[in-house]
Structure formats: C-alpha cells, structure tokens
Amino acid sequence: MSKFLLILILGSLITFGVISFNQNKNISQATENSVDNYAQTKARNVANSTILMLMSTVADDYDFRVVSPTTIQVLDGDVTYFVIDETFEGEDQIKFSVTANVYGVTKSVVAYTDKFPFFPPSFRGAITANSSVLSNGNMTIDGRNHTALGTVIPETGSYAIWTTGTFTQMGTSDLGGTDLKIDYVPSNPANPNVIKENQIWSGGFPDSPDMVLGGPATGFPEGTLKSIAQSGINGSQYVTNPSGLSGNPLSGVTYLELPTNFPHNQWKDMDITGSGVLVLHNSAKNAIMKNLLSGTFKGIIIVDDLIHVQDLATVIGTIIILTPAPTDGNCVGNSDGKVLYSTEAVFDALTGMNLEKRMFNYGFSNSRLYVTNWLE
Amino acid sequence: MSMWIDFIGSYIIGGIILLILFNLNSTISTAASENLHSGIMQRNVTSTADLIEHDIYKIGYRVAGADFAIADSNEIKFSADIDDNGTAEVIHYYCGDKTELNGTFNPNDFLLIREINAVEPGAKTAVVDFNVTYFDSLSQQINYNLLTTQAGMNQIRSLRIKLKCETEDKIDDHYEAAEWEKTMIPKNL
C-alpha cells in the first residue's frame, strides 16, 4: 500500500510539474501579449507626442527645421525625428517624421502640415468660390503671396481662383499665382496652373461665415462672428442695412446681415477702405456685394455673392464666395479692380481680433498648425 | 489490535490523499485547459485588434472625398490610403451570418470580415461580439439614426470598438473568452 501511495504521489507530482510548466508558458505568452500591446500603444503615443511637440516648436519658430535625423529620449523611448519641407499631394507642406522605439517595439508616424501656420484651410486662393467665376475688364487677380502692403513674396503664394465651377477669363483681365513654389506673373491668358476649376470640397463647401473659419470644431460655433461684430471690439460693427455702417475705415469684424429680399439684399457702390474680417451674409445665402468702387481692404472678405471688384478697389488678403447660385452673373470683377492674395493680411486680420486663439484652442491633440495628413 | 487500527487508519488517510490528488489533478488539468484556450483567444483578439488599429488610425488619410460610407453598430466602411501609395482604399468591416459557423459548437460565433476595395483578402476572424460606437468633436456619442446620412457621418471624430472572441467548444461548461475595447481618434478626421 505504502509503495502504491508513493508511486501515486510521485506520479501526481510529475503530472503537476508538467502541467505547471505548460501553464507558466501560457501565462508567459499571455503576459508577452499584454506587454507587446502595451509597448505598441506606448510607442505610438511617444511618436504622436513627439510630433505634437515638434509642431509646437514650429508654431513658435516658423523657420524651425531638422534636416538630419536626430535622436532624443522621450517618455522611456528613443525617438528619431526630422522636420523638412516637402511637396506632398501637390502642395508645399511641412513633413514631420518620427520613429519611436519603446521596449524594442518600433512605431513610425508621419504628419504633414500646411506650410503657413495660422492660415485657415478654407482659403484656397486669392478667390475661393462655390460657383463658376468670370473676370472681365482690366481686373487683376494675383494668387502670388503679398505683404499687407502689396509687395510680392516669392514662392509662397497660392492659386488665383479655386472654384467648384468653371472659370472664364475675359477682356484684358490678368491672373497670376503660385503653384508648387513657381510664381506666375499675372497674364492673359493666365497660366492654367493658377486656376483650379471643378474642385470638390471634402465634406461640402462651408455654408456660413463661421464654417469658413472651421465651425464648432475650431471654436466657431454658428453665430460667433456675428456676436463678435455685435460686441463692437476694435471697431467691429453689425448692421442689417449698409446705411448703418459708421463709415471707413472698416476694422475688426464688420458683419452685414442683409435682408433676403431684393433689392434690400444688396450693398452697392462702396468704398472698401479698411481691414479685418468683412462678412456679407444672410440665411438665404443671397446677400450681394456689388460694385466695389474704391479703397483698399486688407484681410478676409466672406460674402454670399460678389459682383464687380472694380475701378480703384483693391483687396489684399483673400475672398471667399459662398453661394452656389449667383443671382446676377458670375463676374467677380472688371475695369481696374485688384485682388492680391496675402497671408500676412489674413494673419493680421485674425490676430487683430484674437481669432487665431479660437482656431488654435490648445489642448489635447490640438495643434497650432493646420494638419493636412497624419499617418500612424 | 493496534495493528488493525494502524491498518484501517492508513487506508483512510491513504484514501483521503488519493481523493485530494485526483481532485488536484482534475483542477489543474481544467485550469491548464482554460489557460491554454484563454491564451489562444487572447492571441486571436490581439492580432485582430492590431489589424483593426492599423486600419482605423488611418481613416481619412489621403482621402479626397467622404471618409465614411457606412457607420453602423456592427459594420463600418471607410476610405484610407492604408498602403500610403497615393490611392485611397475602401475598407469594409462587417459581420457574417451566424449560420456560416454551424460547424462550431458555439451558437454565438460569427465571422468578422475585412474587405479591401470589395475584395475579401482572407482576413476573417470568428468573434461573438463586434460593436462600433461613434463620437463627435465634443466626444458625445452620435446616435446611429443620424449616421445614415453623409452629413451625420461627417461628424464622426472618434470611434470605440469592442471585440470579443470565444472558443468554439465549451471548456468546463463555459466558453473561454477574451475581450478588447479601445477608443481611437483617427487624426485625419
């Protein structure tokens, strides 16, 4: 009996040992799975965090670039990164490339941002339109970048026209712009590289001034620009009839919410001298800005329907036209009107009203640059 | 007399030890089996989760049009250039029918199928639960009724995916399971 018991106990011990060994192997495997998963997640987090740190650095110092791969330690991981200018998707962009190594797991993340920080992506050229566009007379539309005083800044501009419809160049109107860092002096006929026709706006063309600046996602819920205009800050004005404007120069946010019925939906024959953000809009998206006769406006014009930038009128900055169905033709300008694309004038218009702080509401996963693509 | 007491006592003690050993063996065997299948399920879940993460984080990457085509609780179809070659692919995750897995003893399992550009690349996993929840920019859950329109789907900014796998057969009167759940914020949305 005692011998039998001894054999049984020994057999059980061996069985127990084998099973224990297998169990430990399973547990180790399970732990390995967890650790791998944790390391992958951590490597991804480290890489993403490093990219956000680099973007923050670029936002502070626009000239910051790291051409040669550099390795630093971030949150228990080794990170190799570089920041360079690159043409991606046909646009000049800043490329942020990061490879993080955490506990032997490697994760690479690449992100691209627009070359110009603080420049809302809704503005895609000197004139951005949701309808077909026509230029006439001796008008000039120049998408090359300009200072707020109108001096050309080489290689950093945009298109003359970006439209969801077609473009027609008539009379002796000249169009110029920049494409892939190549500047095109305004000419007739214009170089096709500076005209973008039949474009598609991902997610739908913005249908209100607040959506132009990014909508609720970027700190502009519906009614934000209107309420800023009503506050009167920095000379801002809100009127429902153009005769209520206090005169030139316009400044801050000038918001004209015109009636929807003709002819009260028009603002005609005006001097546009001023700066800031000028909005002409109503619920039917048929507010018309017609015959801009004189003066220089520096900044952003958001308008439902634009007819005739002409004579001595000059816009330095950018114009966006919201209506898909202009009521009085597609001619945005004639005689000697000028539209000169200017990132500086746009930037001044935004910072003058602290609007850029709304747009770049720092916080988790927010960046002060416009991120165009992120591969992780 | 004392010899008889020793003899009977040793039988009783020996019997108890035997019972303990049999019970111990049985418990250890069951635990080992559970552990083994749990490990297999875990590997199943993590490899599927890796694939899902690989795709979901890229939603909208180099996509010109709409990011989502379908956004439902157990089905998601989106566009992303997952191979970074400049052309966006359409990736479709959907659940197969439970009757397709009649060969298994688990009545709840079904196939989770991943298609790229309407072609099944063979990435199928047997799961018992696949659930996707969608959130807007304020991290508020979007009602599935709103996600039947493109405008509704354009509001999606993050997703929470829940995945659960179970064994095909019962292990000690229950199906061994492994579960994974993660909220992801694709940066291109």
Image (cartoon, rainbow, N blue to C red):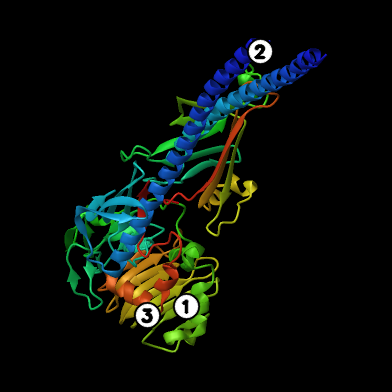
* Mark carried by residue A352: 3
Q: Looking at the rendering, which quadrant does residue A106 occupy?
A: top left
Q: Position of residue A45 (x, y in %)?
A: 41, 51
Query: Most extreme residue toward the right, as rendered?
Result: B1
Q: Residues within 10 Å of mark 3 (few under 14, many from 20)?
A: some
Could you say which is closer to the camera, residue A332 or residue B48? B48
**Label 2 – label 3 distance at C-alpha:** 96 Å
Please report, as a chain letter, where disc 2 is located: A
Please report, as a chain letter, where disc 1 is located: A
Query: Most extreme residue toward the front, as rendered?
Result: B1
Could you say which is closer to the camera, residue A22 or residue B160? A22
Residue position marked by numbered label 1 in the rendering: A255
Between label 1 and label 3, give the one nearer the viewer: 3
Label 1 amino acid? Answer: Tyr
Q: What residue is at 40 percent from the left and 58 percent from the top? A: A131
Residue position marked by numbered label 2 in the rendering: A2
Label 3 amino acid? Answer: Gly
Relative to A133, B59 lies left or right: right
